């Protein structure tokens, strides 16, 4: 079987990278990253899969106006020429030489596993029909953005895959991006960050790279659907300041007032966490507000986790998709 041609792009400036910057800007303006518990940062936070590197370049107000007025938001979208031209011009000023060796290594490592990967995709997943629909695959290795983004635009009866892979992740990250594209054209389940379809897709991809033959391509795969146990407060503050500089001020609201359907136990837990915002609240502290004088008799981590799970669910039901309650394994909870 003939497998799709893979084109690796590593240079700046270029249309792919400029379009990716516009894509990132659009998702920042729509707060899709922020609501999905991703931190938007002005520099690369190596190895952090929950960070989004948006370069700290002097983008003009006209750039952001063009991005905001444009309704497109996917990686293959036709972004305004003004925005694309400005992105290309500013990217030409970016010193990418620091990543030159990393870029070449990822490119070479991918070429070593490419044929075997497609063979396994065809034989293990029986994706021959899906692969046959793919004309070519364009891969951008870049320091910017999330750990990876993708989009499979249709070209006539075929598809072109557009995949990005951040430079601080190994070549197996390209495999994960390609697999997500194949999943979408095979199942037609896409979904934005934080949505139900997003979690369905990521859960399926996670199973493949954590428990099947594909583990060999990505041994350090990060499952983004798992609960994040801690949040780096310094990075969170850095992200808030950077978003403010970009013109995206986070609106503060009283979550306790917004949630009107909490049980008495759920309300007490949320009040406790809110009163210790940004700090670890121990399991014993939570237990005391749940069971008061009967705490020794009724204490149960499972029951406690169920209450916190219900609070998280009700927070999402009022339109807040980002995680605000994090579990600190073996210690307690953090409200941020």
Image: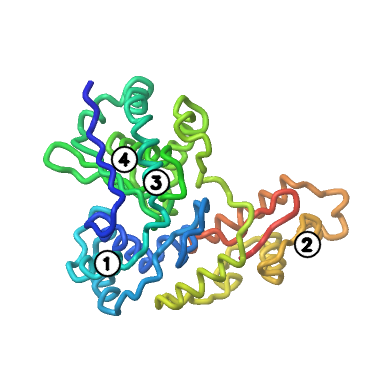
Mark 3 and mark 1 lie on one chain; the one further toward the N terminus is 1
User: At x 70% / y 66%, what residue is drawn?
Assistant: 279
Q: How many marks?
A: 4
Apparent side of residue 61 relative to residue 257 in the rendered image (left or right) = left
Label 1: state its secondary structure: helix
| Residue nearest the viewer, comparing 191 with 331 | 331
The mark lying in front, picked from 4 and 3, is 4
Q: Position of residue 218 (x, y in %)?
A: 47, 35
Residue 144 showing in the rendered view: yes
Question: Within the image, what quadrant is residue 200 found in?
Answer: top left
Residue for badge 4: 181
Mark 2 and mark 1 lie on one chain; the one further toward the N terminus is 1
Mark 4 and mark 2 lie on one chain; the one further toward the N terminus is 4
User: At x 63% / y 56%, what residue is drawn?
Assistant: 230
The mark lying in front, picked from 2 and 3, is 3
Residue for badge 3: 197
Structural distance between the alpha carbons of marks 4 and 1: 26 Å
Q: Position of residue 53 (x, y in %)?
A: 43, 61
The mark lying in front, picked from 3 and 1, is 1
């Amino acid at each position: 079987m003939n497998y799709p041609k893979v084109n690796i792009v590593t240079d700046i400036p270029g249309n792919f990278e400029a379009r990716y910057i516009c894509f990132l800007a659009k998702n920042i303006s729509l707060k899709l990253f922020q609501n999905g518990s991703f931190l938007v940062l002005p520099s690369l936070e190596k190895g952090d899969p929950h960070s989004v590197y948006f370069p700290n370049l002097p983008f003009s107000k006209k750039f952001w106006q063009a991005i905001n007025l444009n309704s497109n938001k996917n990686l293959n979208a036709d972004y305004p020429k003004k925005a694309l031209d400005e992105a290309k011009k500013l990217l030409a000023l970016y010193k990418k030489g620091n990543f030159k060796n990393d870029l070449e290594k990822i490119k070479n490592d991918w070429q070593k596993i490419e044929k075997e990967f497609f063979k396994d995709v065809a034989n293990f997943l029986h994706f021959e029909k899906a692969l046959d629909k793919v004309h070519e695959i364009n891969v951008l290795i870049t320091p910017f953005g999330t750990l990876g983004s993708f989009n499979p635009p249709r070209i006539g009866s075929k598809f072109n895959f557009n995949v990005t892979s951040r430079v601080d992740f190994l070549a197996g990250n390209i495999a994960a991006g390609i697999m997500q594209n194949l999943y979408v054209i095979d199942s037609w389940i896409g979904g934005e960050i934080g949505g139900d379809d997003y979690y369905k897709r990521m859960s399926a991809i996670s199973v493949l790279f954590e428990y099947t033959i594909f583990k060999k391509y990505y041994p350090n795969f990060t499952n983004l659907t798992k609960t994040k146990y801690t949040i780096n407060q310094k990075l969170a503050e850095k992200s808030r300041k950077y978003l403010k500089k970009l013109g995206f001020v986070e609106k503060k609201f009283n979550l306790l007032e917004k949630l009107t359907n909490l049980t008495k136990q759920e309300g007490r837990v949320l009040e406790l966490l809110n009163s210790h915002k940004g700090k670890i609240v121990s399991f014993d502290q939570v237990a005391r507000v749940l069971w008061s004088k009967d705490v020794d008799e009724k204490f149960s981590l499972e029951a406690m986790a169920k209450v916190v799970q219900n609070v998280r669910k009700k927070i999402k039901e009022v339109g807040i998709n980002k995680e605000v309650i994090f579990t600190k394994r073996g210690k307690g909870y953090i409200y941020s």
